Image (tube, helix red, strand yellow):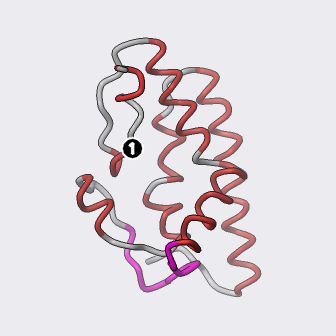
Amino acid sequence: MAAIESVSFSGGNSKEIGSSEGAVVRDADRLDAIGAIGIARTFAYGGAKGRKLYDRTESIRSGMSEHDYRSKKTASLTHFHEKLFLLKDLMITEKGKKLAEDRHQFMKQFVRQMEIETGQSLAPD
């Protein structure tokens, strides 16, 4: 149970890891949120919730409480900046760090391609 309770991102506010099992479970959960699977999940969830693909007028929030993180319905691409791009640096295990780096680079390339295809920078100012 302790390993499961240590998983949540909650706006970047992590709980303490009490075991190596907790570290593996947390890394696995975060790895599932990034890379190709993470991109697909982000846009599927955003579409199901009626969120915009991107909105250049949105500001990227940081240092949020869990309430702040969950209270504003941001565009799917803003979610990359508020959460997904942060996960690489939150990995615990060496294997998790390696896998996260590869997936992080893939997401960055995806965002660059979105910018090329839309003819504008999609990262909020």
Identified by mark 1, the residue type is: Phe
Say which residue appears at 43% left-offset and 85% top-offset: 57
Seen in the picture, residue 106 relative to 57 is either above or below; the reply is: above
Residue at position x 53%, y 81% from top?
A: 52
Q: Would residue 55 be counted in the magenta stretch? A: yes
Counting from the top left corner in percent of width and height, residue 73 is at 39, 73
Number of other residues with Cα within 10 Å of mark 1, as a class: few under 14, some 14 to 19, many 20 or more = some
- Which residue lies under the disc numbered 1? 9
Q: Main secondary structure of the magenta part?
A: loop
Instruction: Please state if 30 lies on the left or on the right of 37 as rendered.
Output: left
Secondary structure at numbered mark 1? loop
Position in image of residue 39 (x %, y %): 65, 58
- In the depicted structure, whether residue 76 falls above or below residue 1: below
The N terminus: image quadrant: top left
Q: Quadrant of residue 97?
A: top right
In the rendering, at what x and y percent does residue 38 appear?
63, 52
The answer to which of 12 and 71 lies nearer the viewer is 71
Please name the residue shown 60% across and 28% down the image.
96
Q: Which residues are magenta?
A: 49-60
Examine the structure image and report whether residue 72 is included in the region drawn in magenta.
no
